[in-house]
Amino acid sequence: MQPFTQLTGIAAPLPVANVDTDKIIPARFLKTLTRTGLGKSLFDGLRYDADGKERPDFVLNQEPYRKAEILIALDNFGCGSSREHAPWALGDFGIRCVIAPSFADIFYNNCFKNGLLPVALPREVCEQLMEETKLGSNARVTVDLERQVVVRANGEEIAFDVDAGRRHALLNGLDEIAETLTHDAGISTFETNRAKAEPWRTAVSL
């Protein structure tokens, strides 16, 4: 998993509350078991019309937001069904951070498992950040996980909270498997000692 330390990028505004996971990635695209290739279907129903043509009024179809790395939305982002494909699709598109007043619990947890940083800020702050995105490519936002601040285009720093364990994992690019493997030596020692003390546990039945 790619580490997340500090990100400075174009922020795209999505002034919508209760964006559910079916809007983020519709169910018909959930056939894949890989994390790649889903970016083109991100927000499919919002990005494309019935003929598959881009809707010019949708933010991610506009310059410079086609290259957005940060998404700013409203309350309860990621609600709905518990599909891990939602952060997969966001990440495959190129978005590494979502800023919103609140997130659905399962989506929030899935973000950390997949290298995406969800940042919860007060609604009025999110609305201010969205207003600033109208500056286009000049409206670059910095998200500094090491210092736990969002830096606005005018230089103002806004603090945010994140669980210490999740912060450590993101800073070091550790998913759950990689975190477990950091304890490999201790696990091996435990297994060796247990095999000596309780050999019947490792006996092979013939």
Image (tube, rainbow, N blue to C red):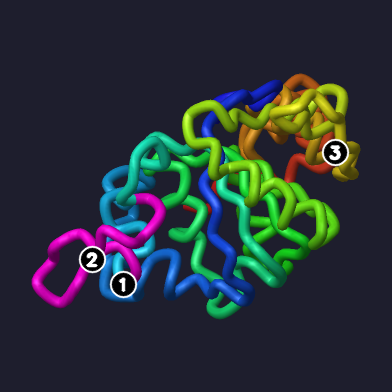
- Residue 129's place in the image compared with 191, above or below, is below
- Residue 162's place in the image compared with 127, above or below, is above
Q: Quadrant of residue 153?
A: top right
Helix, strand or loop under label 3: helix
Q: Quadrant of residue 11?
A: top right
Asked if the residue at tag 1 contacts the one at tag 2, i.e. Cβ–Cβ closer than 8 Å, the answer is yes
Q: Quadrant of the N terminus?
A: top right
Q: Position of residue 127 (x, y in %)?
A: 72, 57
Q: Amino acid at mark 3?
A: Gly
The residue segment tinted magenta is 46-60
- Residue 7 belongs to the span the image colors magenta: no
Q: Residue at x 63, y 73 (%)?
A: 17
Q: Amino acid at mark 1?
A: Gly
Q: On the image, numbered disc 1 is attached to which residue?
A: 45
Helix, strand or loop under label 1: helix
For the residue pair 170 and 146, the one nearer the viewer reads as 146
Mark-to-mark CA distance, 1 and 3: 35 Å
Q: On the image, numbered disc 3 is attached to which residue?
A: 165
Q: Position of residue 51 (x, y in %)?
A: 9, 72
Helix, strand or loop under label 2: loop
Q: Residues within 10 Å of mark 2 (few under 14, many from 20)?
A: some
Q: Amino acid at mark 2?
A: Tyr
Q: Residue at x 23, y 66 (%)?
A: 48
In primary-sequence order, the first of circles 1 and 3 is: 1
Q: Is residue 192 visible?
A: no
Q: On the image, numbered disc 2 is attached to which residue?
A: 48
